[in-house]
Amino acid sequence: MPVRLSFSELKEFLDQKQEEFNNPHFIEKDPISIPHQFTKKEDIEIAGFLTSVISWGNRASIVKDGNKLMGMMDCSPFAFILHATKSDLRPFKSFYHRTFNGDDCTFFLRSLTNIYRNHGGLEKCFLGINEQGARVVISNFRKLFFETHHLKRSEKHISDPLKGSSAKRLLMFLRWMVRNDSGGVDFGIWDQIHPSNLICPLDIHVGNVARKLGLLKRKSNDWQAAEELTVNLRRFDPNDPVKYDFALFGLGIFEKF
């Protein structure tokens, strides 16, 4: 049954929970701990992107495999991406996380090389969000990412919101890169994209809590639901609606709300 709260009561509750979970204590056991190992912008965004790609399943397993992947790149992802040879990529054939296997991994590294050498890097690929919206820009990024030779199976690891997917992992990655506050969790290193244009990452935990709080009516956790949730979150903070991802996710994961 939905929890009945007035607008002001719900805003106060969400603000309180957002502050509670948006702090450095959140980082240690979360996938975002992987890019937090780095200080160079390109290292952060590459580590963040690759970690977001494998961010499904058990959080401890994600962190473990994310750390393994960084170690295989000598803990210098940007330098590795720019200079890796075919022989350097060979060990990645043995990497896997759930259905993300060695073929996927080596392709993703090669595609990132293409993006940094020929397309100005990851940030530049997403700069149209302010004007075109996240849905179109993510879909365009997906086309660009798969412009180099790849196995068809690798395409399932980047969702297309134009086909209805919630694109949860890419939206989470964008939150990491774009949001900049005093919480110490998100990085805010992409300052040309405004947080008001982000869409809230939607997984089963966030969706369940949002429905219980009356913030989401749609039953499917798809792109339309992510947009519906974000529209409602903008009522509480039009400039930074996605900060409430901390509240919804924390309530679902840590408090079993």
Image (cartoon, rainbow, N blue to C red):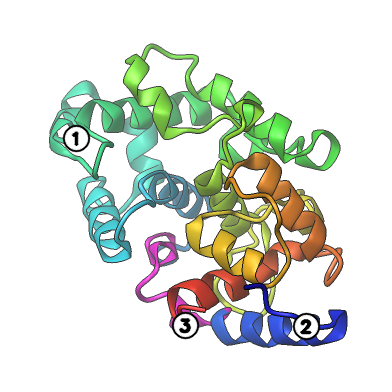
Q: Nearer the viewer, mark 1 or mark 2?
A: 2
Q: Which residue is mark 2?
A: 5
Which secondary structure lies at badge 3? loop
Q: Position of residue 44 (x, y in %)?
A: 48, 55
Q: Position of residue 226 (x, y in %)?
A: 67, 49
Q: Position of residue 170 (x, y in %)?
A: 54, 44
Does residue 111 appear left or right of residue 217 in this picture?
Answer: left
Question: Is residue 200 located in the magenta-colored stretch of the structure?
Answer: no
Q: Earlier in the sequence, mark 3 or mark 1?
A: 1
Which secondary structure lies at badge 2? loop
Which secondary structure lies at badge 1? helix
Does residue 48 appear left or right of residue 144 in this picture?
Answer: left
User: Magenta residues, as a range?
Assistant: 22-35
Q: Earlier in the sequence, mark 1 or mark 2?
A: 2
Residue at 33%, 63% in the rendered image: 59
In three-dimensional space, the C-alpha distance between marks 3 and 1, rounded to whole angstroms, equals 37 Å
